[in-house]
Image (cartoon, rainbow, N blue to C red):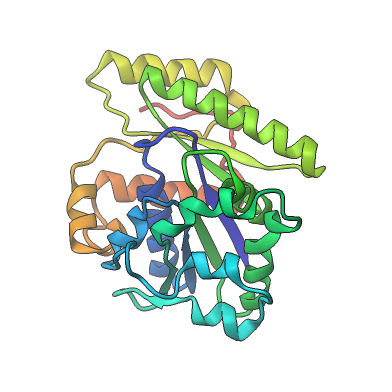
Amino acid sequence: MKVWSIANQKGGVGKTTTAVSLAGMCVLHGSRTLLIDMDPHGSMTSYFGYDPESVQPSLYDLFQADQIGHGFTRSLIHKTSLAGLDLIPASTAIATLDKQLGTKSGMGLVVINAIRQITEQYEHVFIDCPPMLGVLMVNALAACDHLVIPVQTEFLAMKGLERMLNTIQMIEKAKSIHINYTIVPTMFDRRTRASTDSLEYLREHYTEHLWRSVIPIDTLFRECSSNGLPISHFRVSTRGARAYSSLLEDMIKGKSGNPQVVAV
């Protein structure tokens, strides 16, 4: 099993789209795949037709459990409309976890302990993270084998990236772990100066961890969400689908942080 977390401390950069699209590509290639929604906004949960205000059970129940066994973890998993793709949904109640849990020990390993109960059932797990530092973000980073950081190609997104990288350094130091990560430029529009300048900035300052290509802006992503399907199962021939297919291929091959960029 390979666990990927999708995170950035700025909203609107394509985290949910990236998680869903990569998961869809895995399913397209025959891999059993699990999505975990850890964002209190519940965008991924809504994507697949569940209501974050009322869905039961949800990720919230995981953090309330006294014991995490195989049967309990399985009970949190919901089906999506796509065979081979399952979901542990978020409820809006997870926004209260930091206040509820306080400094309670062991709370940073809740998700990884749950994932360990179902390692035989899935080949890939994708975690959609909240845009803020807290117990949920710590869990997602502790659980993943690789972190994907989508960064919208516009100036303000660079500040969110800096905060995310500072968070990685802080958690690595506090938990004595090493977090492998890849920065993925998203919503790239070659027609705008903002996009081209931002991409050049990323290539100049983050070459070592920057993915070699970009995820282009594609209006079909909105249609995918309204239909509750990943782009891989909505219209696989689009430029957005081809980009995520390429990203997944590089990630699986371990080349997602390739400093050799390609022309866009």
- Where residue 152 sits in the image (x, y, percent)? 38, 30
- Tell me what residue is drawn at x 59 percent, y 29 percent: 259
Q: How many marks?
A: 0
The quadrant in which the C terminus is found is top left
The one nearer the camera, 226 or 207, is 226
- Where residue 59 sits in the image (x, y, percent)? 50, 65
Task: Decide if residue 253 is on the left or right side of residue 14.
Answer: right
- Tell me what residue is drawn at x 66 percent, y 49 percent: 102
Task: Decide if residue 193 is on the left or right side of residue 78.
Answer: left
- Tell me what residue is drawn at x 24 percent, y 64 percent: 228
- Where residue 235 sits in the image (x, y, percent)? 22, 58
The one nearer the camera, 118 or 187, is 118
- Where residue 89 sits in the image (x, y, percent)? 42, 66
When the figure is inspected, residue 242 is found, relative to residue 217, above or below; the finding is below
- Tell me what residue is drawn at x 71 percent, y 39 percent: 171
Location of residue 118 (image quadrant): bottom right
Task: Decide if residue 3 is on the left or right side of residue 235.
Answer: right
Task: Decide if residue 214 is on the left or right side of residue 220.
Answer: right
The quadrant in which the N terminus is found is bottom right
When the figure is inspected, residue 123 is found, relative to residue 226, above or below; the finding is below
Extreme right residue here?
176
